[in-house]
Image: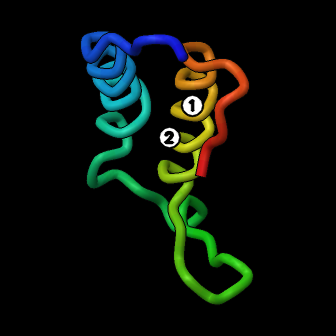
Amino acid sequence: MSEINDDDIKNILFQISKEIILPKYQKLDLEDIKSKNNGDLVISVDIDVEDRLKNELLKLLPNSLFV
């Protein structure tokens, strides 16, 4: 199994925060809020962060699973 450098993870999280989370902080519009099938609320930022995080982490650990 490959070793993961903590700095790589920190950099990924920093970039995601800078590019996705902070621009929308306290600036959500109604269309940014959605409802899941079970009725729970989710915001577009959550979905965007999850997608980006999954893609970036899979680059570090190909063939891994994301839950």
- In this rendered view, identify the residue nearer to me: 64 or 9: 64
Q: Is the Cβ of the residue at disc 2 closer than 8 Å to that at disc 1?
A: yes
Q: CA distance from mark 2 to mark 1?
A: 5 Å
> x%, y% of residue 53?
52, 33
Residue 42 higher or lower than 36, as above or below: above
> x%, y% of residue 9?
34, 21
- Packing grade of label 2 (10 A; few <14, some 14-19, many >=20) is some
Say what amino acid the circle numbered 1 marks. Arg
Residue 58 higher or lower than 66, as above or below: above
At a point 34% along the width and 51% down the height, the residue shown is 27
- In this rendered view, identify the residue nearer to me: 7 or 41: 7
Say what amino acid the circle numbered 2 marks. Val
Q: Secondary structure at mark 1?
A: helix
- How many marks are shown on the rendered structure? 2
Q: Secondary structure at mark 2?
A: helix
Q: Which residue is mark 1?
A: 52
Q: Is residue 34 left or right of residue 20?
A: right
- In this rendered view, identify the residue nearer to me: 66 or 30: 66
> x%, y% of residue 43?
51, 61
At a point 48% along the width and 60% down the height, the residue shown is 29
Q: Is residue 64 left or right of residue 32?
A: right
Q: In the drawing, what numbered circle is on residue 49?
A: 2
Colour scheme of the rendered structure: rainbow
